[in-house]
Image: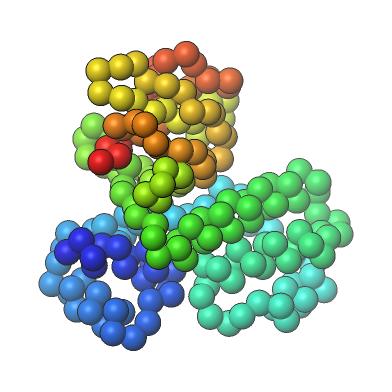
Amino acid sequence: MKDLRELLPDYALGLLEGEEKTRLEQALQSSAELRQELLELQAALLRLPESLPPVTPPPRVWARIQQRTHPRRNFLRWAAAVLVVAALGLGGWGVGLYRQYQTLAQEQAKVARWLVDPEVKWQLIKNSEGQSFGTMLWREEGPCLMVLREPPPPGRVYQAWGRKNGEEPVSLGVFSGRVFETNYEGFDFMGVSLEPPGGSPQPTEPLGRVPTS
C-alpha cells in the first residue's frame, strides 16, 4: 500500500499514466482508505484558488493565456495561466487583486515543483480528532513544504513549529497564506498553530502535527 500512496499526488494532478495509473485505479476501487486519502490530498492541494474572489480577465488577456497554455494537466495549466496574467499585465485590474493572484501563482507553482519530484514523500497533517487540515511534503535531506487547506482567519496567522521529544517547540516562522517551506531536520515532530499577527513565543492554539520519522 505504501508505494501506491506515493502515486496519489501525481494522480491527483492528472500526471499519472500507463501501468501505474491502471494499478492505482484498481486499488482505489477496492480500498476505501486509499480513496479517502486521495480525496483529502486533493482538497489540501487543489483548493488554493478558492482564497480569491472570482474575476474575469479582460478578453484580450484571456485570449493570450489560452494561446500559451497546454490543454492537458488542469492544475498546472491553471498555475501557468495565472503566471501568464502576471507577465502580461492586468490592465484595469486593481493592484491589490493583482498582488493576490501573483502570490497565489507563486504558491501553486511551488506546490507543482515539489509534486513532480519523484523523491518527495507526503503525509496528511491531522488535528487531535484525526481530521486532516493540510499536507506536509518532504525530502529525505530535510526540506519540507506545508500546504494547508484553508487560509488563516482574518487577523490571524499560521505559525510553523519543530519539536524534539521532551523539549519545547521551536518556532520556524509565521505565514498568512496556505503554503510554507521550511526544514524538518533535527526535529521529531512538525506542527502548525493559529496565532495573532507576528506569532507567539509558544503555540497558543495548536492545530496539529506530523511525526518526521
Q: Residue at x 80, y 48 (%)?
A: 94
Q: Which quarter of the rendered picture does the N terminus lie within?
A: bottom left
Q: Is residue 208 above or below residue 200?
A: below
Q: Is residue 48 above or below residue 65?
A: above
- Residue 172 visible in this rendered orientation of the protein: yes
Taking the view exactly as shown, the residue that stands out farthest to the front is 141
Asked where in the image residue 134 lies, by quadrant, the reply is top left
40 and 166: which one is in front?
Answer: 166
Q: Residue at x 76, y 43 (%)?
A: 96
* Residue 90, percent from left and from top: 81, 59
The reply, left or right, for residue 131 in relation to residue 134 is left
* Residue 31, percent from left and from top: 14, 67
The reply, left or right, for residue 79 in relation to residue 182 is right
* Residue 128, percent from left and from top: 23, 32
Q: Residue at x 51, y 75 (%)?
A: 73
- Residue 178 visible in this rendered orientation of the protein: no
Taking the view exactly as shown, the residue that stands out farthest to the left is 30
Q: Is residue 86 above or below residue 17?
A: above
* Residue 159, percent from left and from top: 48, 28
